[in-house]
Amino acid sequence: MFQAPLPLEYQGLSPEVMHERIVAARETLGKRVVILGHHYQRDETIRYADYRGDSYKLAKEGAALADAEFIIFCGVHFMAESADILAQPNQKVLLPNLSAGCSMADMANIFQVRACWNALSKLGVAGKTVPVTYINSAANLKAFVGEHGGSVCTSSNCAAVLEWAIGQGEKILFFPDQHLGRNTALAMGYSADEMVVWDPNADDGLGGNTAEAIVAAKFILWKGHCSVHGRFTVSQIEQARKKYPTVRVVVHPECRQEVVAAADDYGSTERIQKLIRESPNGSIWAVGTEINQVNRLAEEQKVNDKIVFCLDPIVCPCSTMYRIAPSFLLWMLENLVEGTVVNEIIVPDEIAVNARKALNQMIAVAG
Ligand code: 13P
Ligand code: SF4
């Protein structure tokens, strides 16, 4: 989405001035405002978060914050949309910078998903297919899933959701991240032969597959990916092991299959944090996820003599998460103090109803 530039008076402020004004505005607003921060937010922004977490934890925690009038989401657009869908009717969810999207979420849109579903219908398999969308998707895709008896999932509960979905039908259509779908299904004991990849840009009406392959497949994985996690390679893991023979390698399941297979462990951003925090003092960790989270963990764990570093030697920030700069947060807070609501994320009711079904289905499964 498009974000208008900040008013001139918010540009070029020193970090100290910004900090003082953010603290002052928050004091004025008190409990009317709660700030959520995803683990990929930069230090200068996440320091103001009342709650930090992975996308599941923030979706659940946001839903439980019934008292706050405003939920400011320091994360990306699909997270703020989910928070709005789960929020109380009197609450407003705000995203400090509207251009904070997710390139993976943009790899599936409602027209493409409907076209895929129509193709499955023509093949006679849509009725046995349960759609599952990663939370990294637009609200109208969550609504599509809710309308067709499926569920949302996040990286922390994908296996549980797939297990549930398999109990509901014979096939899963999983979008938009092929890697999360593949990595999870493989870990559950399914084989690569049971999966096909649906390319929404193929012009054969079959996503680049034969009709027989689609009919035979257990999992139809959408051809989407995260460009940040796509940077991690097996060779980086080998280098890390060469340099530190005792290193533990943990990666996010949005990484490619061979990278997840070469790592010691994988999990959501919250799980990565937990694993590192709970490891013995002196542990060494090579991490395959976004750099702001890795650097923060490295800094935090120095006192425990742990070495934590990013697998990718060339910095790999999520550029859209990075757009939530403190200046945008200040602008939003000072506007609220003046009684003006900026950047409210509103999911229309006709979409929210079914999207809520799909999110609540995930919560019911994941707990
Ligand atoms: P988590 O749910 O693990 O926080 O992941 C969100 C995400 O976008 C990772 O790229
Ligand atoms: Fe999207 Fe990748 Fe950024 Fe996560 S890291 S928000 S999947 S672009």
Image (cartoon, rainbow, N blue to C red):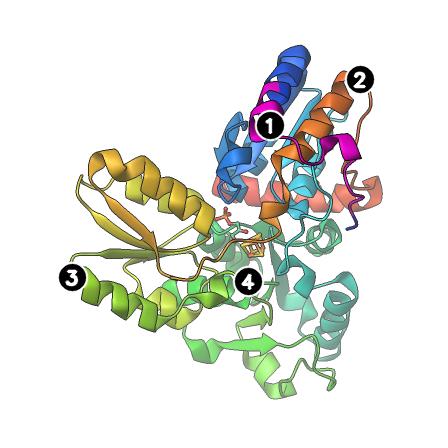
Alpha carbon separation for disc pair 3 and 1: 41 Å
In contact (CB < 8 Å): disc 2 and disc 1: no
Image location (x, y in percent) of residue 289? 43, 54
Q: Which residue is mark 4?
A: 226
Answer yes or no: is residue 97 visible: yes
Residue at point 72%, 29% (across, down): 331
Residue at point 22%, 50% (across, down): 284
Query: Could you say which disc has been placed on residue 35 in the image?
Result: 1
In contact (CB < 8 Å): disc 4 and disc 3: no
Q: Which residue is mark 3?
A: 245
Alpha carbon separation for disc pair 3 and 2: 57 Å
Sequence-wise, the earlier of marks 3 and 1 is: 1
Q: Which residue is mark 2?
A: 338
Alpha carbon separation for disc pair 4 and 3: 29 Å
Query: Could you say which disc has been placed on residue 313 in the image?
Result: none
Q: Is residue 150 above or below residue 9?
A: below
